[in-house]
Image (tube, rainbow, N blue to C red):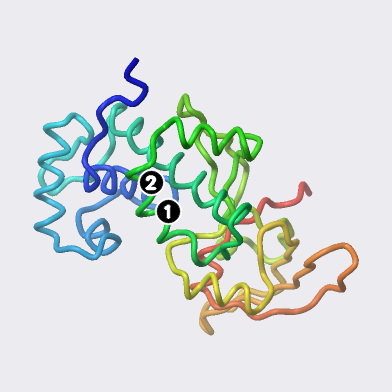
Amino acid sequence: MGNTPTRPSTSAEDYVKVIYDLQERGTGPVTISGMAERLSVSNSSVSGMLRKLNELGFVEHQRYGAVSLTEAGTKAALSVLRRHRLLETYLVAELGYSWDEVHDEAEILEHVVSDKFVDRIAAHLGDPVVDPHGDPIPTRDGDIVERESVLLSDAEEGTRGAIVRVNDNDPDLLRYLADIDIGIGMTVEVVERQPFAGSIQITVRPGEEVPERSQALGLVAAEALWISPDAK
């Protein structure tokens, strides 16, 4: 009973995960330079790895063209994302990690834990559909529960909604958001967009019993937060 089929190498898993993540979060096509920046490697390193992933049938990439995942590549990416996001959830829920600490731990653990171990975590946690940063957790079959959301930086003035997701790539940014008491589930409203000042003005309501407060938020932070707008 081969519970775990042969997995791609650690580096192959990292690459397909990044391509999927850039496709999922990004606004434009996935490029070699964009991947190189995200992975902190050279463009030539990315090109070399893409050739290998092409041979494995995980990516489609024409010279100087955009990078995209094949069905097999998407399946591999969702598998590693399931491990990563369930590990993050477990570390926060059961081991007392803060949301800015878990990403780096999960980056290491995701390549070594078995699918059986991850399925046990999922069952123990009640099969969560999102991780502590609001990222959707793929099911064993590779399904994802999609929610209607918009980047806070793109939201029009007057838009109000709950924060449902935060980009977890920058621990410093997560610590900053924690310091100014902004997190998943809080209700925010865009009061004024100030693009030339590089910021937006929002009101924040952390909870029912807590009064609203006004908050200036830099665009870097606003580009890392997704909200689920209230129905008009």
- Residue 5 in percent (x, y) is at 29, 24
Instruction: Find disc 1 in the rendering and name its residue.
Output: 106
Q: Amino acid at mark 2?
A: Glu
Instruction: Find disc 2 in the rendering and name its residue.
Output: 110
Mark 2 and mark 1 in contact (Cβ < 8 Å)? Answer: yes
**Quarter of the image where one finds residue 53:** top left
Q: Amino acid at mark 1?
A: Ala
- Residue 231 in percent (x, y) is at 77, 47
- Look at 32% across and 19% down and name the residue there: 2
- Look at 21% across and 41% down and name the residue there: 9
From the viewer's perspective, is residue 226 above or below residue 123?
below
- Residue 129 in percent (x, y) is at 60, 39
**Quarter of the image where one finds residue 70:** top left
Crowd tier of the residue under label 2, counting other residues whose Cα lies within 10 Å: few below 14, some 14–19, many 20 or above: many
Observer-nearest of 119 and 53:
119
Is there any visible trace of residue 165 in the rendered image?
Answer: no
Instruction: Tell me: 100 left or right of 114.
Output: right
Instruction: Tell me: 230 left or right of 33.
Output: right
The secondary element bearing badge 2 is classed as loop
Crowd tier of the residue under label 1, counting other residues whose Cα lies within 10 Å: few below 14, some 14–19, many 20 or above: many
For the N terminus, which image quadrant? Answer: top left
Observer-nearest of 60 and 17:
17
Instruction: Tell me: 92 left or right of 158.
Output: left
- Look at 44% across and 41% down and name the residue there: 83
Q: Residue furthest bottom?
A: 197
Observer-nearest of 70 and 6:
6
- Look at 31% across and 27% down and name the residue there: 71
